[in-house]
Amino acid sequence: MISASRSTLKTVSGIVWFSGAAVLLAKGVSLFTAAIALRPDESWSWLAVAAGALIGAVKGQFLFSGFCRKNLARIAALSEPQLWQAFRPGFYVFLMAMVLLGATLSSLAVGSYPALMAMVVLDISLGVALLGSLRVFWQQPAV
């Protein structure tokens, strides 16, 4: 096993969190571009982006920030931190399942404007929530 300091685990978890936000926001923009290509005259399409951002801001503040605080408290309580312990083992299984589900839903949405817009709302909301809760990683004292 690879030993790591608590500070390293905090950094790794912050990088994973930020990476998820960046990927989801980029994917949301890509799907939005595909939806606009299908229906360029739809002026309300930007409402999907705004809705996703608003939902994400609320989720980031009230849900994801709590997850970050709990994870940082768990890291602080580790007696012999290992690099893989940046998150609980279940998180890695959940993350893999979410990546596969997101990729499947996105591929199914191709060519369907309503499905693409739903995926835009989903991806933007999750990306903004992850990005908004990222502040917890630098607000929490060093562990």
Image (spheres, rainbow, N blue to C red):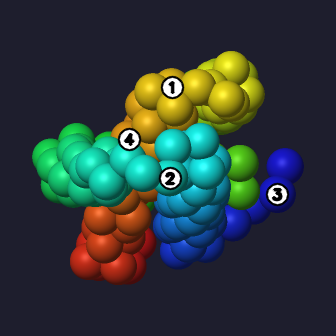
Q: Residues within 10 Å of mark 3 (few under 14, many from 20)?
A: few
Location of mark 2 (residue)? 40
In the image, which disc is placed on residue 115? 1
Query: In the rendered view, does 135 fall on the left or right side of 1?
Result: left
**Displayed quadrant of residue 55:** top left
Marks 3 and 1, how far apart at CA: 43 Å
Q: Is residue 24 left or right of residue 52?
A: right
Q: Which residue is mark 4?
A: 121
| Amino acid, disc 2 | Pro
Q: Residues within 10 Å of mark 2 (few under 14, many from 20)?
A: few
Disc 4 to disc 2, how far (Cα)?
A: 18 Å
Q: Which residue is mark 3?
A: 2
Residue 126 shows in this picture = no
The alpha-carbon separation of the residues under discs 4 and 3 comes to 39 Å
Q: Quadrant of the C terminus?
A: bottom left
> Residue 81, how many percent across, how many down?
62, 55
Looking at the image, do the residues carrying marks 1 and 4 touch, with CB atoms under 8 Å apart?
A: no
The amino acid sitting under disc 3 is Ile
